[in-house]
Amino acid sequence: MPVRTPSRLPFWDVLTEAQVGKLHADTLTVLEQTGVEVNEGRSRQLLAKAGAAIEGARVRIPAPLVEQALLTAPKEILIYDREKQPAMRLAPGYSYFGTGSDTTWVVDPEVGERRRTDLDSIRMTARLGDALPNLDFIMSMGTAPEIAPELADQHHFAAMVESTTKPVMFTVQSERAARRIVAMCAVICGGPEALWERPFAVLYAMPTAPLYHTAEALSALLVCAEAGIPAVYSSAPQFGATGPITIAGSLVVANAEMLSGLVIQQLHRPGAIFVHGPIPGPLDMRTMVNNYGGPDVILALAAGAQLARHYGLPAFGLGGSSDSKVFDQQAAAEASMQLITNALAGANLIHDVGYLESGMTASPEAMTFMDEVIDQVRYLLRGVAVSEEANMLSDILEVGPRGSFLTRDSTLDNFRETMWTGPLTDRRRYEEWAESGALDASARTRARTLQLLRNHQPRPLDQSIATRLWRIAVGEDG
């Protein structure tokens, strides 16, 4: 899977430079005066040694520690795939799209019914993501309650990596699970040094809003820093609940959590790879549901991506998801709006493609449809080329008034590049559409989803590697 080309468009900035500076200054004030709770011993020791004020679990972090961490964190990252080929360049202008993580339900495309996720559904969505050309990375689109909790993270990871060659993003609930997944990554890469040089997996860990770091999240952050595995450490406060009711207030809380996590990571391993990018959203005061799909979320995500760009750090984002319970018009509208706006805002890793029900349900059909929307987003990000060749002045001069460009060689040579088409989008005449079955977009999407799932086979892991992975996953090794 080749590295994508960057956007040619200017970023969509929703904040002025003065507003960005104010958010940063207020974040430093929170870290210095209120501080954060750090429920992990090694992290507190690192902070104390560096000059932070420690009072029990509460840590107050002086501004110079934040500035130093921002200096040592890498500004550009290259992530590889399972086949050790460059896959994602996290740098300004590059946007990549992937699924979401840890849903409870899945809409089974074979029967169209919502059911509990399991290890097989994780394999199914990873395999579909492997087949879809515009999905760049894979997350565990479900959880497996049939697996013992202390082994579930490793099983989710093994199910993903045997079902796709694309980069994977994983979650863990304990330090032990993190170390086992690091061991699995090393097996796939050919050893710890090879993993360090060409990481194909990304940790997704989160602080707990407001202003709290769990032992589990920080231990995973430190373990992955030691192994050279990039880490997304993204905060998701809920407006009016775990964060202030305003977008700006929740951004300050989220930023304080992420930057304090960055300080801890960089004190442990200067130069470790850190992905910024808050994903705050509103708690609906009528339903007590954390909403995903509204314009309030879009603005918060765009501001978060702008903060990350201000720091020169790769930006985490969210797109392709919806609060709708089924993949319908609401879902298509919300998911598409998220994708284009988050890409324009400069997010590098845009996850949650295929989420429904505010992050509770995975929809393979939504994944398939959004893959085509992403292709259109990428077309838009190309912008309009203006040049001697693109302006086609010589053709215009030769054809002249009342002429035709239809038979020109330039038309034949360039029409496929200029005109966007997709396997799901129908632009035929009504009569042709009706004669071919009058299938609407939902029916076409379901048919393509089933066709991909029935026919696509990901490149298999070497059998000896697969055997070692599953030995680690079940706790027999590593």
Image: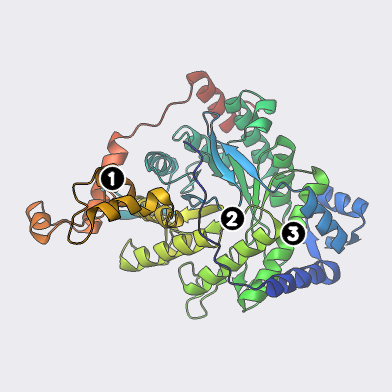
Q: Are marks 2 and 3 in contact (CB under 8 Å)?
A: no
- State the residue position of label 1: 410
Residue density around tag 2, few if under 14, some if 14–19, many if 20 or more, within 10 Å: many
Rounded to the nearest angstrom, the CA distance separating label 1 from label 3 is 52 Å
Give whichever of discs 2 and 1 has the lower sequence position: 2
Tag 3 secondary structure = helix
| Amino acid found under the numbered disc labelled 1 | Ser
Q: Is residue 20 visible?
A: yes
Which residue is at the front of the view, 103 or 413? 413
Give whichever of discs 2 and 3 has the lower sequence position: 3
Q: Which is in the foreground here, disc 2 or disc 1?
A: 1
- Residue 399 spot, x, y in % from top left: 23, 54
Image label count: 3
Give whichever of discs 1 and 3 has the lower sequence position: 3
| Amino acid found under the numbered disc labelled 2 | Phe
Rounded to the nearest angstrom, the CA distance separating label 2 from label 1 is 41 Å
Which residue is at the front of the view, 174 or 422? 422
- State the residue position of label 3: 259
Which residue is at the front of the view, 239 or 345? 345
Q: Is residue 174 left or right of residue 443?
A: right
- State the residue position of label 2: 316
Residue density around tag 1, few if under 14, some if 14–19, many if 20 or more, within 10 Å: few
- Residue 87 spot, x, y in % from top left: 53, 38
Residue in the picture at 62% in, 45% down: 203
